[in-house]
Image (cartoon, rainbow, N blue to C red):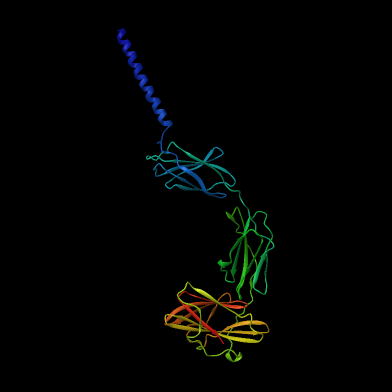
Amino acid sequence: MTKLKCISVKTISVVLCIIAMMVHTSCFEDEISGCDFPAVKNLNTVSVSQDKAEIRFTDNSGATSFSIKVSSAGTQIQSKDVSSQSAVLDNLAPDTEYIVEVRPNCPDGSPGTQPSTLTFRTKKSCTLSPVSNLAVTLDNSNILEAVWDAHDVATKYNVTIHDSHNNELLWAYKSLTETRFSINLYTGMSVYVSVSPVCQDGESVSENITSSSILTTQSIMPGGTVPSGDQPCITDDCSIIDAASQVLIPKGNSGGDYVVAFSSLSINSCRTMYFRFSWSGGYADVPLFLIKNNGKTTVYTQSATCTAFSNDLQRKNADLLRQTVKINGHDRYFGIVCYKNEVRFFVPPDIELKGKTL
């Protein structure tokens, strides 16, 4: 009996040891649940604003998804799984420090054991009010200048110019740190200026924009047509251009422009200029008339007598003329911009421009 008891006790002890080992192993496995994928590398912020941050990292484990946890002041505030090696963290508080933990996920979807961490701070909030004392002037040379008071919070200012139809002139947009802006405008434009303060290096742009009243630059284009008998140099003949005329812009180039200056016109004089736009064996002729009376130069066009035109020259929001001409039954385009002391032609690459002055 004694021997049997000893065996029973020993057996029981072995069983208890096995059970204990199993329990210990199970607990240990719970503590290290997850695969041993290597940690992601190069964890960094791509951009940080007041309430948002974009992070990026590099993975070498072959994981197909990643677990991201975000905490602040010891409290987890959000978590997400992503399939790409980048993520956008939304709904953050301004001027707050955050810790991001990224782990590659195991094949079963559980987070791996190797984390990578990153600490960053969101930008401070920026409450912007409109700029004050915006003053806009326009001189006789069509140079517009705008000045305003410096903003207490703004680090720079976005300046935009709109025409009278509220279309933004993209070529006139400017972002600057000083409180003064100037630009040389076309003749015959009606525009207004808007100034928007910006802070946080462009991350926060004010919706409180300060705008000026509408100003109109001086025009050199007439409001209507002028009968040929009213000016000695205006003629009904639109065919004076000939093959011997000088090539001003050759065809087959990348596009070009040609400038006709008339600052040297004598007082109370006029000048007739003829231009021929050639394309694919056909052409269209355009006469322009420069008239200088009492020191003021005015540019006229005479399209009504030129049957090559499909319609009269169209004046838009400035002394900028964009014209459609019929050449061999096809619509072709060119542009004319009239300035105070010059006329500038713009043509497509496949158009040849010839011209001469009488």
Percent x, y of residue 160:
60, 65
> Which quarter of the figure is the C terminus placed in?
bottom right
277 on left or right of 62:
right
Determine whether 291 is above or below 347 in the image. below
- Is residue 168 shown to the viewer in this render? no
Location of residue 292 (image quadrant): bottom right
- Is residue 352 shown to the viewer in this render? yes
Location of residue 213 (image quadrant): bottom right
Determine whether 326 is above or below 152 in the image. below
109 on left or right of 177:
left
Q: How many marks?
A: 0
Percent x, y of residue 347:
50, 76
> Which quarter of the figure is the N terminus placed in?
top left
Location of residue 179 (image quadrant): bottom right
Percent x, y of residue 191:
61, 70
In the image, 58 versus 24, the foreground residue is 58
Most extreme residue toward the bottom is 229
In the image, 132 versus 220, the foreground residue is 220
- Tell me the residue at 37%/20% (across/down): 17
In the image, 144 versus 100, the foreground residue is 144
Percent x, y of residue 165:
57, 71
In the image, 208 versus 54, the foreground residue is 54
